[in-house]
Amino acid sequence: MLLTLHQITKSYPGPEGPVPVLQGVDLTLAAGETMALTGESGSGKSTLLHLAAALDRPDSGTITLDGTLVSTLDDRGRAALRRSRVGIVFQQFNLVPSLTVAANIALQARMAGRHDPDRDRALVESLGLTPHLAKYPEQLSGGQQQRTAIARALAARPALILADEPTGNLDEATAEGVLDAMLALVAETGAALLAVTHSARVAARMSRQVHLREGRVA
């Protein structure tokens, strides 16, 4: 398995004590597999995604990514793992405002030592970003920023792609194109894709669907 989460628990401080968010979650994802993570707001979907991305640590349980026990790594080790093995598409995009679209897309691939200009051109074209390469994030629409964030995550050829509502700001036709690009990368490279989504259409295109309810796999 590329990704294994075993008996994961996570709570956050509340005014009356810890508020449990994840309560003993088990999840596995194989290389080349695609998974939709669904559930009501507050069910723990985004928290689980952040833990899988090594952006946070669980209170208990273990997370293993590509043979590495993520939950025991220090901050530097987790950052190195994210840089080399994980592509993340955030809801907030997290583009670098001082960089052009082209530079934003190339950023993580350069950090991972896998920058391929020819691949970038094909990716940019598939996502309809060619006319916007010299622009800065503030000059883009929300949908264009989202496509740029997706291109940045895919350009580095990560082993694991984690996406939080990857088509949430896109119209239906554009969303289909974005999904096509993401699924093509999985098929081409053997990467795995875990996508948090409220869209039944997006979920239906994944090979598996997992539903969270009140911090547990339903």
Image: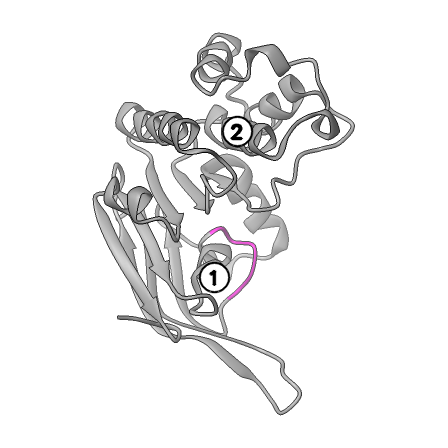
Give the residue at the far left of this rendering: 207
Residue 184 lies, with reference to residue 82, above or below; the image says above
Please give the residue where the numbered disc 2 appears in the rendered image. 147
Q: CA distance from mark 2 to mark 1?
A: 31 Å
Residue found at x 37% / y 30%: 182
Coordinates of residue 65 in the picture (x, y in percent): 38, 49
Coordinates of residue 13 in the picture (x, y in percent): 62, 80
Prevailing SS of the magenta stretch: loop
Local secondary structure at mark 1: helix
Queried whether the magenta region covers residue 127, the answer comes back as: no
Q: Amino acid at mark 2?
A: Arg
Q: Are marks 2 and 1 in contact (CB under 8 Å)?
A: no
Q: Is residue 149 left or right of residue 210?
A: right
Give the residue at the far top of this rendering: 118
Residue 35 lies, with reference to residue 62, above or below; the image says above
Disc 2 packing (10 Å; few <14; some 14–19; many ≥20): many
Q: Which quadrant of the view contains residue 134?
A: top right
Residue found at x 48% / y 59%: 46
Give the residue at the far right of this rendering: 98
Residues rendered magenta in the picture: 53-57
Give the residue at the far bottom of this rendering: 16
Residue found at x 50% / y 13%: 116
Q: Amino acid at mark 1?
A: Ser
Please give the residue where the numbered disc 1 appears in the rendered image. 71
Q: Nearer the viewer, mark 2 or mark 1?
A: 2
Coordinates of residue 143 in the picture (x, y in percent): 56, 32
Of residues 64 and 151, the one nearer the viewer is: 151
Local secondary structure at mark 2: helix
Q: How many numbered callouts?
A: 2
